[in-house]
C-alpha cells in the first residue's frame, strides 16, 4: 500500500527539525546558494535559518533571476470572491469562527452573479478564487459546483478555498471547470493543532492533511499550500510544508503547485494574538528561499500584506498578487463589509496595483493559461 503524507509526517520530529534549522551555519547557506540543481529540504532549512540573514541580498538576486527566467517580467492578478461566512468550525484565529455572534450569509445565485459582475467592473480579472467557510450541509459540494457554473462565463480560471472534499468531489468540480484548490494546513504541529481548532471538522488534523492526496488523485490542475504564520515556529512549519511539497510533487507530478504566505491579521471575535511574530525581512527571506528551492513554484502574496512590502516583492520572486480584495461575503456589491474574515492591509484598487507593477517594468497577466494548454 502506498503511504500517504499523513503517514509519513509521523517520521518527522518537530523539536528535532527546529534544532537542526537553528544549527545551520554560514557554510551550509553558501553550499545551498551554489547549487544549480534541485535543492533538498536540508538546503531549504539552511536558507530559512538565522545563519542565512547576512545573505539576504544574494538570495534576493538569485530569487529575481530564477523568477524572471521561468516566468518573465509578469505578475498574475487574481481576486477572491467570498461566498459565505457560515462555518461549523471553531478556529480561534478566524473571523468566521462559529462562536462569533455575527450575521451568517450564504450568497444566493443572484447575489453570486452580482458579485462576479462587480469584480469584473473593478478590473479585467480572469482568475477568481471562490472562498467559503466550512458548512457542508448548506454550502457543500453541490453549492460550490453551482457557484462554479455561475461564474464560469465571467472568468477563465476558477480556484477554490473551501472545506476539504472527497476525491470524487474534487474530480466532479474539476470536470465542471475548477482549475486549482488552495487548502492551508495552518500548522503542521500535530500535537498543538487542536489548540487552534478545538471544535468542528477542521479539528481533525489527518482529515485535513489527507485532502491534498485526494486532490492529487482527482487530477486537480494546481494545488496551493500554506501555513498560517503566527501559530507556531514559522521556520519549522515551513520546513514541514517543504517536505509535504516534495512528497506531492513526486507522487502527483502532473500537478502544478503554489505557495502562499499568510501572516495573521486582525479579525473580529476571540482576542487571539499570534504566538510568533515574523518581521518583513524574515518573510522576504522565506520568499527568496522558496524560489531558490523550486524555480517553478507559483508564489502568491495577498492583501494581508501592506503596499510597500508587496511592491518590493513584485520583482523579487512573487508571481501572483490579489488586488482590490474584499474578504467578506457580498463585499463587492451586495452587503459591503458585513464581516471580513481578516482585515485587508493593502486597500488599493486593482488599477492602482497595476500601475505600481508597471512602474517597476513588469506586465500584469489577467488571464491564466487555458486548461487545454495545461
Image: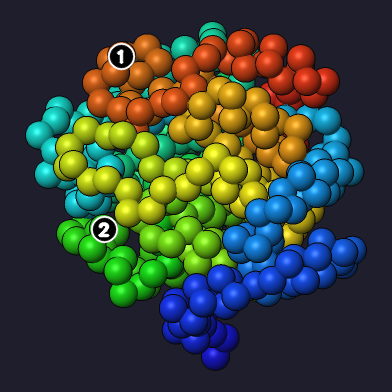
Q: Which residue is mark 1?
A: 336
Q: How is the image coloured?
A: rainbow
Q: Residues within 10 Å of mark 1 (few under 14, many from 20)?
A: few
Question: Any mark on residue 159, and which?
Answer: none
Q: Name the spot of residue 39 as percent of width and height, x first.
A: 77, 68
Q: Which residue occupies 25% across, 59% down?
A: 197
Q: Can residue 161 be seen in this snapshot?
A: no
Residue where numbered disc 2 is placed: 196
Q: CA distance from mark 2 to mark 1?
A: 29 Å
As helix, strand or loop, the secondary structure at mark 1 comes to loop
Secondary structure of the residue carrying numbered label 2: helix
Determine the image quadrant of residue 341.
Answer: top left
The residue shown at (74%, 72%) is 28
Instruction: List x then y, in percent, for residue 187.
Output: 40, 61
Pointer 2 local density, CA inside 10 Å: few below 14, some 14–19, many at least 20: some
Please, is residue 104 above or below residue 14 in the view? above
Q: Nearer the viewer, residue 175 or 13?
A: 13
Judge by depth and name the residue closer to the eye, 138 or 282.
282
Amino acid at each position: 500500500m502506498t503511504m500517504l503524507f499523513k503517514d509519513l509526517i509521523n517520521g518527522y520530529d518537530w523539536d528535532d527539525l527546529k534544532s537542526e534549522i537553528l544549527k545551520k551555519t554560514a557554510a551550509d547557506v553558501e553550499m545551498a546558494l551554489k547549487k544549480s540543481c534541485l535543492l533538498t529540504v536540508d538546503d531549504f532549512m539552511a536558507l530559512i535559518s538565522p545563519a542565512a540573514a547576512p545573505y539576504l541580498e544574494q538570495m534576493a538576486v538569485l530569487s529575481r533571476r530564477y523568477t524572471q527566467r521561468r516566468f518573465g517580467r509578469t505578475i498574475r492578478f487574481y481576486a477572491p470572491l467570498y461566498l459565505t461566512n457560515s462555518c461549523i468550525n471553531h478556529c480561534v484565529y478566524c473571523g468566521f469562527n462559529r462562536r462569533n455572534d455575527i450575521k451568517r450569509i450564504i450568497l444566493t445565485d443572484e447575489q453570486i452573479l452580482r458579485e462576479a459582475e462587480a469584480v469584473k467592473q473593478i478590473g479585467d480579472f480572469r482568475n477568481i478564487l471562490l472562498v467559503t467557510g466550512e458548512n457542508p450541509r448548506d454550502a457543500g459540494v453541490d453549492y460550490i459546483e453551482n457557484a462554479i457554473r455561475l461564474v464560469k462565463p465571467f472568468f477563465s480560471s476558477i480556484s477554490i478555498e473551501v472545506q476539504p472534499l472527497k476525491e470524487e468531489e474534487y474530480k466532479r468540480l474539476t470536470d465542471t471547470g475548477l482549475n486549482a484548490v488552495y487548502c492551508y494546513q495552518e500548522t503542521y504541529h500535530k500535537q498543538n493543532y487542536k489548540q487552534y481548532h478545538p471544535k468542528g471538522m477542521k479539528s481533525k488534523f489527518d482529515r485535513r492533511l489527507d485532502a491534498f492526496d485526494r486532490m492529487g488523485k482527482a487530477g486537480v490542475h494546481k494545488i496551493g499550500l500554506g501555513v498560517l504564520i503566527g501559530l507556531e515556529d514559522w521556520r519549522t512549519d515551513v520546513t514541514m510544508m517543504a517536505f509535504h511539497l516534495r512528497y506531492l510533487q513526486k507522487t502527483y507530478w502532473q500537478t502544478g503547485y503554489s505557495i502562499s504566505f499568510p501572516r495573521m491579521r486582525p479579525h473580529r471575535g476571540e482576542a487571539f494574538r499570534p504566538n510568533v511574530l515574523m518581521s518583513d525581512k524574515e518573510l522576504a527571506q522565506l520568499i527568496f528561499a522558496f524560489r531558490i528551492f523550486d524555480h517553478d513554484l507559483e508564489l502568491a502574496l495577498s492583501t494581508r500584506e501592506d503596499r510597500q512590502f508587496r511592491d518590493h516583492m513584485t520583482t523579487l520572486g512573487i508571481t501572483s498578487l490579489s488586488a482590490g480584495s474584499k474578504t467578506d461575503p457580498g463585499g463587492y456589491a451586495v452587503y459591503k463589509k458585513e464581516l471580513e474574515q481578516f482585515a485587508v492591509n493593502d486597500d488599493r484598487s486593482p488599477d492602482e496595483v497595476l500601475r505600481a507593477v508597471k512602474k517597476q517594468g513588469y506586465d500584469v497577466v489577467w488571464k491564466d493559461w487555458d486548461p487545454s494548454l495545461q
